Image (cartoon, rainbow, N blue to C red):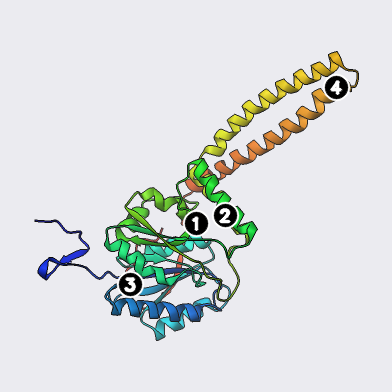
Amino acid sequence: MELLHPRHLDIQHGQNMRARPIVSLVLPCYNEQEVLPETTKRLVALLDDMEAQGQCAPGSAIYYVDDGSHDATWKMIQEYSVAELRVCGVKLSRNRGHQNALLCGLMTVPGEILVSLDADLQDDLGVIPKMLASYGEGCEIVYAARSKRSADSFFKRFTAESYYKVLEFLGVQVVYNHADFRLMSRRAIEALREYEETHLFLRGMIPQLGYRTATVEFERAPRLAGESKYPLSKMLSLAWQGVTSFTAYPLRLITGLGALVSVGSLALALWALAVRLFGDTALPGWASIVIPTYFLGGIQLLSLGIIGEYLAKVYEAIKKRPRFHVEAVCGREFCHAPIL
């Protein structure tokens, strides 16, 4: 007798039908009052349509995670949760950053399938049914990756693509052109729960789970309303987080720099000796003092900075402080997983 995938039901005439899963859409929010009405409208319509087509179960819902917003975001989430049964909300006690807010949603909301996406409607909702199809074929994680970056400025496109290449060179496993738009099964979520990193970089953590994955492509739309919550400073911070959280290569680079400095110092000594013996333009003491001082000083400061960054991460990790606190929830009742 042929063994069927657990997500399929054996029906008449030997045909297979995927059991309808409960789908939870998880959206971190920070000052999103301008875009929230349209986001809610489109997501509710999407779930209604998928339920009508048999792609998800009636218990499927939208879960907004308010990351300490200063505007009317949480008030609007509460109002939507009263007017629409599909909308639920989780409010963090203070702003903890996008990655912590997203982790809170993944760790606390129910559902057989969790789909994380941004609240600004730049992610293509039309690919979610494709992600569910890949899940039905046995994939535990489905990534949504951008097919192209033509809408980005040259600077943003160049820096983003360079960053993925640098991560690949350093040995960090990430999905090219993928942010945090992904589908995860309950099995993958429970595996992620075992990771206790203080400094989160989910784009690097989730590929570490090792389950069967798939990738779907989409074109990212312009932001519907409001302002980007990821300015250049936060993008650089997230980039550095990804490097220092998943590879010790910068520390090993210091050893290479030390060897390079040694070779350079030897070459400089030979050059100074050659100028002294075969020329008459050498300034006494200049080459042997000024150049090595500035060169070695810069290398030492760089090395200390890198070492200090890793030590700071160790210091913060051993304190084991909670990554977030939930202040309030709204919407229909759902079972909470343990708060991390």
Helix or strand or loop: what does disc 3 sit on?
loop
Q: Tell me whether the residue at label 2 lies in contact with that at label 1, contact meaning CB atoms closer than 8 angstroms.
A: yes
For label 2, count other residues whose C-alpha is less than 10 Å away and answer few (under 14), some (14-19) or many (20+): some
Q: Nearer the viewer, mark 1 or mark 3?
A: 1
Direction left: furthest residue: 1
Helix or strand or loop: what does disc 4 sit on?
loop
Residue at image coords 80%, 16%: 273
For label 4, count other residues whose C-alpha is less than 10 Å away and answer few (under 14), some (14-19) or many (20+): few
In terms of sequence position, does the residue under pointer 3 or pointer 4 come before the other?
Answer: 4
Q: Is residue 236 visible?
A: no
User: On the image, numbered disc 2 is attached to which residue?
Assistant: 160
User: On the image, numbered disc 4 is attached to which residue?
Assistant: 285
Q: Residue 284: where, in percent of width, then height?
A: 88, 20
Q: Residue 145: where, in percent of width, then height?
A: 45, 60
Residue at image coords 73%, 33%: 297
In terms of sequence position, does the residue under pointer 2 or pointer 1 come before the other?
Answer: 2
User: On the image, numbered disc 3 is attached to which residue?
Assistant: 334
